[in-house]
Amino acid sequence: MFMEHLALTYKCHSSIGNSLDLKIMMKEVLSTFVEETNAINGFFYLLDEDDLLHKYLSYDNSFEYDKEFLKSKITDYKYVKTFDLENRKVLILPLNKGILFIVYENFEVNFEYITSMFQDLIVKLNISIDACLNVQRMKNKNKILKHLTNELKEQQQKLIESDKYKTDFLANMSHELKTPLNSIIVISSIMSKNKNQKLDEEQVKNMKIINNCGNDLLLLINDILDISKIEAGEIALNLSKIDINELIEDLVNEMKPLVIEKNLVLKTNNLSKNIILLTDSHRIKQILKNLLSNAIKFTQKGMIEVILEENANDITIKVVDQGIGISEEKLKYIFERFKQADSSTTRKYGGTGLGLAISKELALLLGADIKAFSVLNKGSTFELILPKKTNIKNISDDKVIISSKDEDYGVEDIVFFDSDIKEEDTFSQKNEKILIIDSDYGSFFPIAVYLKKNDFILNYCKFIEEAKEILSSEIYELVVIYDENLNEIDDFLDYCRNKNLKFIVVSSTENKEHFVKKELVQTELLEKILSYLGK
């Protein structure tokens, strides 16, 4: 008898918790409990949050009991117990989240042992039911979250499309507005000069007002056009070597009439040595002009200073004014679009509130940064921090142009883009080294960008003899040779063959081995380099 009880306990215990699906798990539990204890039927009722009974599962649907009657039998119960019902005996198993009823016709069953056994199983059964219900809740929440995620994705896509339509509209409208506006500016400028003396003094004055308003409106339109280009990723950079001292001097001379008109003092400090940077002079000038214009606009009296400072890694240009200043709580918002110190500033001083936002965006594209410091009613300081090593960010290769091939700079002068490379576009390599001889930097620049992104090591030299010295001491997988103005090109190609070095010749003639025609560098050279390296 002991062995039979032990086997029964093991089977009933083993039937619990074999699935995280409540229906599957309880079906196995009911089947085992009914069949192994010689019962005729079993029911599992689930309790909801309001403690209401709901029939969840039955072993045999051939007969049912009144739910209210069953509920009356379980009032104030805590333990497994039995009651008599229509010549049958019903065993009640109270659970945290439900109730099990096991129905017997055989009254000779050892109910004392079964009751004791089921009492011991309740803890495990409660844990298993809780686990199943938690999994079901998580699945339901995941379905809701998935549905909400899909809705958010759809809304995000609509917002992106809407934003694109807005950007396109602004760009198109800006272009459309500039055409008649330019005519207004030109004609009003000519008429205000009154060369034929056909206008009286009042009419000349009105023409000047029209011209000034037209120029102000043109500046606003240009701001909107710039922000639209930035949003659309259509900003192009034209890199060239510039002297920062000269750029600041030219800009200050350009802004002096505005300073004189307001009876302000404008001071600058030029460093004794030339500061040469590889950057986009037009964009740097645009940023500094905006900072200076703001300083002049918001300064009623006093001095404006342009201070140039240099350290090991970057150049800092400070524009310091004694103007109205910006409160501390509003300072953090000034680089956001359409924001100024407050709404009254726009009304009093004009502007779209886009100038600083555009300047910040342009600075970031050039790998630079702008910082602002201010004390209300005492003045402001804006710092443009330019890295000595150009760091271009989030601009596609074809939107970066090097303006001259004759300048003494190389691709090593540039820290390449931080834009993401799609996984499918990358390929594995072991930092292959490529030697480029007498390269045309302007045409080779986009190719160098791609190679640098993918961890190729590039080295440059000007002459054949220099290349031989490098190749004698280091191992290179490929040599790219621009043959224009190179002496001893044929001997050098023999040198490469003897060393089993792969090489590509960029030439205007077509009689060279491994040849790429010079005018096709942009379209063919990169493909040939990757092909030669087995990529």
Image: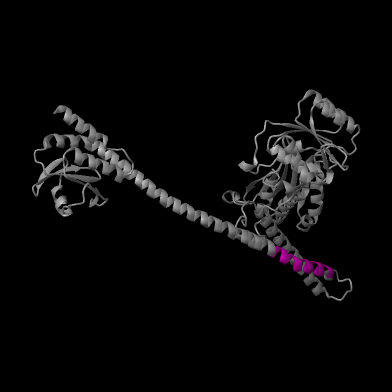
- Asked if residue 209 lies left or right of residue 101, the reply is right
Q: Residue at x 86, y 71 (%)?
A: 194
In front here: 350 or 398?
A: 398
The quarter of the picture where residue 203 lies is bottom right
Instruction: Name the residue at the top extreme.
Output: 473
Across and down, in percent, residue 223 comes to 69, 58
Magenta: main secondary structure: helix
Image quadrant for the N terminus?
A: top left
- Residue 99 shows in the view: yes
In front here: 27 or 56?
A: 27
Across and down, in percent, residue 149 comes to 47, 52
In front here: 370 or 129?
A: 129
The quarter of the picture where residue 342 lies is bottom right
- Asked if residue 294 lies left or right of residue 404, the reply is left
Across and down, in percent, residue 307 comes to 75, 43
Numbered range of the magenta stretch: 173-190
189 part of magenta stretch: yes
Q: Residue at x 16, y 40 (%)?
A: 38
Across and down, in percent, residue 267 comes to 77, 47
- Is 183 located above or below residue 405 in the figure? below
Q: Residue at x 33, y 41 (%)?
A: 20
Q: Residue at x 30, y 38 (%)?
A: 17
61 part of magenta stretch: no
- Residue 243 shows in the view: no
In front here: 261 or 349?
A: 349
Image quadrant for the C terminus?
A: top right
